[in-house]
Amino acid sequence: RDYEEAISILLLDQQVLTGAPAGMQLPPEQVERAKQQIRALHDDLRRIRALAECAQLKEAGDAALRRKDVDQAVECYGKVLALDPSFVAALSNRAAARLMNGEWKACQRDCSLALGHLRASGTAAAGGVSRGSALGSVPKRGSTRHTGFMVKTLARRSLAYCKLGKFSKAIQDLEEAIPLEDADKVGKLTSDLERVRAQFEEMGDVVGEEEEEVEEEEQEVVGEEESEKMLDENSRSNN
């Protein structure tokens, strides 16, 4: 509502923007500056509304996951990601749901996409919104929330890798997660790492030729960002 009020003020009272008396003919450059500010407010308003809808759908997915209604949870998280493919909480939690369902490859994929977005936090996203900003769906790099998502997403992917027989990849994820985890919680990750190292020493990696590499999956984030940018530009041209 505050944004809508601000837009109305900008449209009705040019003095807010220029200091010129209402009704005065404005120079073209001031008119263009006013239009740019109004467009920016509209873009932010659309983004806020989309994020609010995403948050509601994500909460519904979380509630379903707590009930162990995995299919419903996956469906809710999928609706979030249809609106915003970079919504990290939905990707990471859908990965958890897929772990519960025994969908190891799908879990690995969701984790890899989430980690790709987390590692890109702070870079420019479609529409000029900084990834990890107040208007973004990716936690800001260096924040407690960002670190928390890094830890749990790496842990989830390491488990999926173990189920897929990719023990060396699981070790890498756990080694990355351990320094990020709180001291009072790191014990479980440390014991998991010891267990996975023992499995790797005993069996090595058991990887089928059809398995994709994580680097390829994380690179898909770049393609998604380009697609989002194109969709945003098309949306602007149609308005």
Image (cartoon, grey):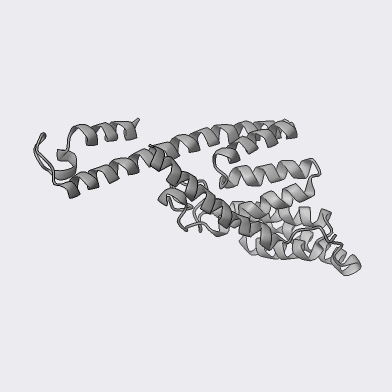
Please tell me which residue is depicted at 56% across the width and 57% down the height of the picture.
222
The quadrant of the picture occupied by the N terminus is top left
Q: Is residue 185 visible?
A: no
Please tell me which residue is depicted at 40% across the width and 42% down the height of the picture.
236
Q: Is residue 228 visible?
A: yes
Please tell me which residue is depicted at 23% across the width and 47% down the height of the picture.
33
Image position of 216 with respect to 59: above or below: below
Residue 71 vs residue 188, the one in the foreground = 71
In percent of width and height, residue 159 lies at 77, 54
Image position of 143 with respect to 37: above or below: below
Residue 51 vs residue 21, the one in the foreground = 21
Left of 206 or right of it: where is 97? left
In percent of width and height, residue 102 lies at 81, 44
Please tell me which residue is depicted at 53% across the width and 58% down the height of the picture.
120
In percent of width and height, residue 95 lies at 70, 46
Left of 21 or right of it: where is 212? right
Location of residue 202 by image quarter: bottom right
Image position of 31 with respect to 226: above or below: above
